[in-house]
């Protein structure tokens, strides 16, 4: 308070510390390591960091190797040993808030950049696919100008649509206005295509064919 900060809550257990962090969303938490209850200060600090993204400064009398090792895993923004000088505490709080602000901005910037990269790759993939489709149709148009045999023309057209990677499968049906199948050819379907042709010749036309 002497440094101009407002104290939102003072609690004496790890569970209450987590609860108040969720309710108050403070700029920083000062945490003792030894706290009564199911959660000690280190466990509470980890929950506060991961669940609410609030920076934690340890303020404790414990400097043993095990405590420090556990505390380091929670990525604290400071570790002060009691008794603490007022100036040391003030400087640590200011630096913690500043570093946390920078880290948050950097993370948000990285997330935006990653999303932009994903969207750009999707756009590039779509352009590549559309160019392949366009090239397929260009090849078919060129084929039409010099191929005179109808069946060979249709078969080569299907193969071109596959080879240019514009399509994974291709089928061409030549039908009369009454729906009679004159000829049918495919590429990429294999044995799956013949039952389809048999179905068409029997007069049972799927919706997609009727619409076409």
Image (cartoon, rainbow, N blue to C red):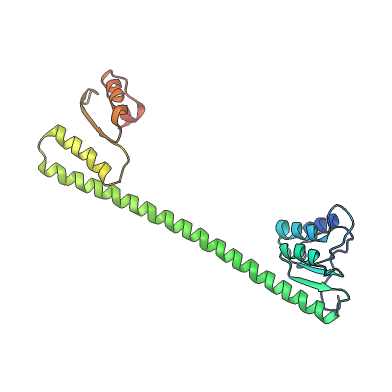
Q: In the orientation shown, which residue stands out farthest toward the top?
A: 202
Q: Position of residue 136 (x, y in %)?
A: 25, 46
Residue 16: image location, x then y, percent: 85, 56
Q: Residue 199 in the image: state x and y as whole percent.
A: 30, 21
**Residue 15: in sight, yes or no?**
yes
Instruction: Please tell me whether residue 81 is drawn above or below residue 193 in the rendered image.
Output: below
Q: Is residue 103 left or right of residue 170?
A: right
User: In what quadrant of the picture does the N terminus appear?
Assistant: bottom right
**Left-right relation of 30 to 184:** right
Please name the residue shown 87% across and 70% down the image.
61
> In the figure, 63 relative to 184: above or below?
below
Q: Is residue 52 above or below residue 212?
A: below
At horizontal 38% and vertical 52% (from top left) the residue drawn is: 126
**What count of labels does the image hold?**
0
Residue shown at 10% from the left, 43% from the top = 146
Q: Quadrant of the C terminus?
A: top left
Task: Answer whether residue 174 is visible to the viewer in this image.
Answer: no
């Amino acid at each position: 308070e002497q440094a101009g900060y407002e104290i939102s809550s003072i609690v004496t257990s790890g569970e209450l510390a987590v609860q108040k962090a969720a309710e108050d969303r403070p700029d920083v938490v000062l945490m003792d390591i030894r706290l009564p209850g199911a959660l000690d200060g280190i466990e509470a600090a980890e929950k506060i960091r991961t669940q609410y993204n609030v920076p934690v400064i340890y303020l404790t009398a414990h400097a043993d190797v095990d405590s420090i090792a556990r505390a380091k895993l929670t990525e604290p923004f400071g570790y002060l040993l009691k008794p603490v000088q007022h100036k040391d505490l003030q400087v640590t709080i200011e630096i913690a808030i500043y570093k946390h602000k920078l880290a948050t901005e950097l993370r948000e910037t990285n997330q935006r950049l990653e999303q932009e990269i994903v969207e750009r790759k999707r756009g590039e993939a779509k352009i590549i696919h559309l160019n392949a489709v366009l090239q397929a149709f260009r090849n078919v148009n060129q084929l039409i100008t010099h191929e005179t045999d109808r069946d060979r023309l249709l078969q080569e057209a299907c193969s071109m649509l596959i080879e240019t990677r514009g399509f994974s499968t291709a089928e061409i049906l030549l039908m009369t206005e009454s729906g009679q199948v004159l000829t049918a050819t495919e590429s990429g379907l294999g044995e799956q295509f013949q039952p389809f042709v048999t179905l068409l010749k029997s007069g049972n036309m799927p919706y997609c064919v009727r619409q076409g």
